[in-house]
Image: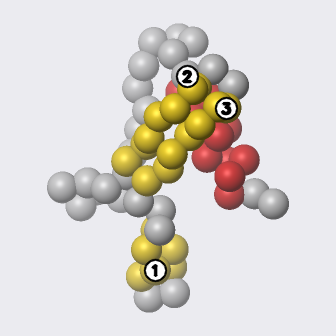
């Protein structure tokens, strides 16, 4: 996590033992400076599970 002028920017997430994900890391740092990211994959590949894990970590 990095603070930028009052804003918080998450750089990466590590997900462990969440639903079907045993251990993975989602790196949001970009060499191109992009501010928008997308998850692309086949059906049932875990895209929604990644978003749910990130959401559950950010909500009280």
Front one among 3 and 20: 20
Q: Is residue 39 left or right of residue 47?
A: left
> Which of the 4 quarters of the picture holds residue 52?
top right
Q: Is residue 29 above or below residue 21?
A: below
Q: Is residue 8 above or below residue 55?
A: below
Mark 3 vs mark 1, foreground winner is: 3
SS assignment at label 2: loop
Front one among 59 and 36: 59
Q: Which mark is residue 18?
A: 3
Q: Which mark is residue 3?
A: 1
**Residue in view at x 51 percent, y 45 percent:** 14
The x, y position of residue 12, in whole percent, is 43, 53
Residue 48 in view of the camera = no
The x, y position of residue 38, in whole percent, is 41, 38
Mark 2 sits on what residue?
A: 46
The x, y position of residue 39, in whole percent, is 43, 33
**Residue in view at x 47 percent, y 62 percent:** 10
Q: Is residue 58 above or below residue 39?
A: below
**Residue in view at x 47 percent, y 34 percent:** 24
Q: Residue furthest top?
A: 43
Q: Earlier in the sequence, mark 3 or mark 1?
A: 1
Task: For label 3, count other residues whose C-alpha is less than 10 Å away and answer few (under 14), some (14-19) or many (20+).
Answer: few
């Amino acid at each position: 996590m990095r603070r930028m002028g009052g804003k918080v920017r998450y750089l990466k997430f590590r997900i462990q033992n969440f639903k079907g994900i045993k251990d993975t890391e989602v790196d949001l740092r970009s060499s191109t400076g992009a501010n928008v990211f997308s998850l692309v994959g086949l059906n049932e590949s875990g895209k929604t599970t990644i978003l749910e894990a990130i959401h559950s970590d950010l909500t009280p």
